[in-house]
Image (cartoon, rainbow, N blue to C red):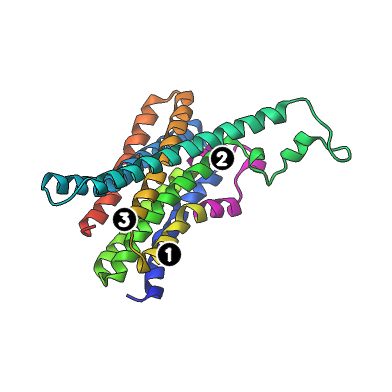
Amino acid sequence: MSLSKTLLLGFIAGVTILLGLPVGRLRRPAPGLRATLNALAIGILLFLVWDVLTHAWEPIDTALGKVHDHSGGLAPVFGYGALFAVGLTVGLGSLVAYEQWMGRVGRDKDAPRRFGPGAAAAAELDARPGRLSAWSPERRLALMIAVGIGLHNFAEGLAIGQSAARGELALATLLVVGFGLHNATEGFGIVAPLASDGEAEQTRPTVAFLLLLGLIGGGPTFVGTAVGHGFTSEPVSVVFLTLAAGSILYVVIQLLGVAAKARRPGLLATGLLLGLLAGFATDAIVTAAGA
């Protein structure tokens, strides 16, 4: 398959993430709806953690099987194992460090004012709208979700590009359908925190901000498709999958904290179950394609 047609498949698979983003602009969503959307996001992201770790573990499992059959050595096991551990650590640890840094920035803003140039206070300069430190916790959480999903979608794009490069048109098309449905559900996961940040018109996310989140979360599918069409590397896939798993795992912890504050265990269980089922249902299409 030509590169242009392959890129079109990658674009279709990635752009469906936009379908769920308008939920982030809901005006004054009811507390029950906010709790349900948060739980739905947890279910979807828990599925993604399982999904990416399963795929990242496959090369290690294969290498261990070869050791058992005496057809391979331990070097691939340790090599892939090291990539697995490092990717997971960096994915999780980088977001922990990011949140700690943002916490220090927040404490500095609450400190007594230090006057900067003219009549402006230094804290006021740090709180300009364009700075991450001025974002609400909900917006920063949505950004983290988009980054984690983007890493995951890059690995999915690699699979689309590689199958298209081998001339497996049917497989590539079914992958696009499956991954496209995946991304549609992931869009809801990204904007779930924003539904509780839109109580006033001035705090509702703009269309441009939602499109930015969609680009971060869905754009890597297109990029991964382009890379996968001309380059195949299992170690690269393992790295991106484990980075995604670590970052998504941290986000799940944050969303569980939000769910605990809502104190709606029934809605939490319902939304979580629906999110998990949605993830497995869309994954079934990919599995049916033979991927």
Instruction: Characterize the local packing of mark 3: few (<14), some (14-19) or many (20 or more) Cα atoms within 10 angstroms.
Output: few
Q: Residue at x 49, y 24 (%)?
A: 261
Residue type at tag 2? Arg
Would residue 166 be visible to someone looking at this image?
A: yes
- Residue segment shown in magenta: 192-214
Labels 2 and 1: the sequence-earlier one? 1
Label annotation for residue 168: none
Secondary structure at badge 1 equals helix
Instruction: Characterize the local packing of mark 1: few (<14), some (14-19) or many (20 or more) Cα atoms within 10 angstroms.
Output: many
Residue picked out by circle 1? 11
Q: Is residue 203 magenta?
A: yes
> Where residue 185 sits in the image (x, y, percent)?
39, 48
Residue picked out by circle 3? 234
Would residue 41 be visible to someone looking at this image?
A: no
Q: CA distance from mark 3 to mark 2?
A: 31 Å
In front of the other: 141 or 265:
141
**Which numbered mark, 3 or 2, is in the foreground of this view?**
3
Label annotation for residue 140: 2
Q: CA distance from mark 3 to mark 1?
A: 22 Å
Q: Marks 1 and 2: in contact by CB < 8 Å?
A: no
Labels 3 and 1: the sequence-earlier one? 1
Q: CA distance from mark 2 to mark 1?
A: 26 Å
In front of the other: 198 or 232:
232
| Quadrant of res 222 | bottom left
Residue type at tag 3? Glu
Left or right? Give the position of 181 relative to 192: left
Secondary structure at badge 2 equals helix
Residue type at tag 1? Phe
| Quadrant of res 199 | top right
> Where residue 167 sits in the image (x, y, percent)?
27, 72
Q: Marks 1 and 3: in contact by CB < 8 Å?
A: no
Q: Residue at x 25, y 45 (%)?
A: 77
